[in-house]
Amino acid sequence: MYNNYITMSPENNLSSLESIVKPLLEAASTTHWRNSLNVLYLSGHVMAFSEELQFPCIISARGPYDEVESASDLLKGKTEVAITKIGKDSLPIIMPVITSLLKQEELRTALEEDREEKLVKIFIDLYSSQFQKMQDEFFQIFISGASTIADWITPELYENLLEMREKMIRSAFYDDEYEEMVDSLLKLNLIKPRLQINLCPRCADYQITLTKTATILENCPNCGVEWASVTLFTFIHPYNEIKKNNSDLPLFISSYLKHKIVTLYPAKELEIFPMAKVSLEDGTIFDIDVYIPEYDMGFECKVFEDAYARMTSSRINSLVGGLLPQIHRYFDAGIQKVFIVTNLVESSSNKVERLLKRKLSESGYPSEVELLAKDYDKLLKWLDEKAQLITNQRAKLFTKSLEIKNGPEKLE
C-alpha cells in the first residue's frame, strides 16, 4: 500500500521563519511566561478584525467591563437626540440653496440631456457663490456635533470589541487564562496596543485613545469610579503574517524540537522541516506541517475555530472526515508515525482519536496516530519525550557506528 518514495527540495519548507517564534521558544523555557503559548491555540481567522480587514488582533478587557450597559444606553440616547438637533439646525441653511438650485432652468436642461460637464460646472459655480458663504455656520454645527459623533462611536465600538473578545475566548479559552496570555504576549513584545477605550459605568464619561502604549488609568477623573477598559492589540510584524494562517504552531514545534535535540545531543543537527511541501511518486504534492524524514515522523497541526463547541456525534464525524484525507497522504508517503496537535479539550480529543483510529483501520491504514489536546504544559512534555526518543536512537546509532569502525575493544 505504501509508497516510500517521497521527495522534497530544501526550499520547499519554511525553516527560515522559525526565528519569528523565538520569543515563544524562550518563554517555553520559563515558569511564569509560558502561558503565552496559549496564542498557538487561537485560530487566525477567529482573531481577524473583520471579514474585510483580515489582520489578527487580540482584545483585552479590564475593570468592570461587564457593568457598562447603562452607560452605553445613556450615550446612545444622547446621540439620538443630538443627531435630530443637528439635522434641524442644518435644514434652514441648506434648503433655500436646494430650492433655488432646483428652480434653475439650466439645471433641468442639463439633467434631461445628461450633460455631465454642464452639471459639474453648475455645482462648482454654486459652491463658489453659496456654500462658501455658509462655511462659518456649518463649522459651528460640526463643532457642536463632534461630541455627538464620539458619543455614537464609543458604545458601538466598545460593544463590538467585547464581542470579538468573547468570540476568541469561546473558541479555545477560559477567561482568566486568556488575559494572562495577553499580559505575557505584551511583555514579550509580540503584540502592541493600538486602540483603548475607557468607559465609566457610573457617569458614562469616556476616553478613546489611539496609542502605541497602553495607558492604564484606574479611575474615572469625573466621578472616581473604576474605569471599564477595552484595548485592541495587534501582532508585530512578521508574527502577524504567520498568525493569519496558523503557521505559528508548526513553526514553534519544529524550532522547539530542534532546540531540545541539539541540547540533548549536539553531535549532529537533525533535519526537521516546518510546513514542508512534499511530492509522491505519482506526482501528488501535499503539505506536512512538521516533517522529520530521518525518523518517518509527521506532525499535523489543527487549530479549530470552535474548539470548545459541544462534541456531538455529527461534529466528531465532521472533524474526523476532515482529518482522514490528510492522514491517508501521510501514510501513503511512508510516514510511519503521525502525531496530531490540536486545540481541542482532552475529552473532545479522545473522542476524535478513537473514531479516527477506527476509520483508519477500516480503510486498511495503520491506526498508529496520536492526538494531543490543548495544554501547553502537556505539549512541552510531549515534545520533550519525542526529542528524548530521537536522541536515544541517534546515540545508539552513533555507538554502533563506532563499534563497527573501531571494534568493541577500542571503546573500553
Image: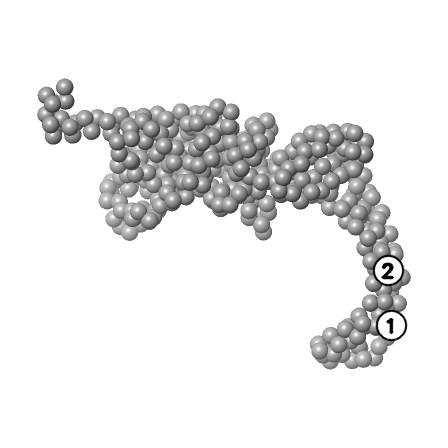
Regarding mark 1 in the picture, which secondary structure is present there? helix
Amino acid type at circle 1 is Ser
Q: Is residue 91 left or right of residue 357?
A: right
Q: Quadrant of residue 218?
A: top right
Looking at the image, is 148 positioned above or below residue 349? below
Regarding mark 2 in the picture, which secondary structure is present there? helix
Q: Which residue is mark 1?
A: 100
Residue 296 visible at all: no
Q: Quadrant of the C terminus?
A: top left
Residue nearest the viewer, comparing 376 with 302: 376
- Figure disc tally: 2
Q: Is residue 345 left or right of residue 14?
A: right
Q: Which mark sits nearer the N-terminus, 1 or 2?
A: 1
Q: Nearer the viewer, mark 1 or mark 2?
A: 2
Q: Residue at the location (52% across, 34% down)?
A: 188
Give the x, y percent position of residue 260.
Answer: 35, 29
Q: Quadrant of the N terminus?
A: top left
Q: Which residue is mark 2?
A: 137
Looking at the image, is 213 positioned above or below residue 390? below
Q: Quadrant of residue 383?
A: top left
Q: Quadrant of residue 355?
A: top left
Q: Residue at the location (80% across, 47% down)?
A: 147
Label number found at residue 46: none
Q: Residue at the location (78% across, 80% down)?
A: 109
Give the x, y percent position of residue 44.
Answer: 51, 42
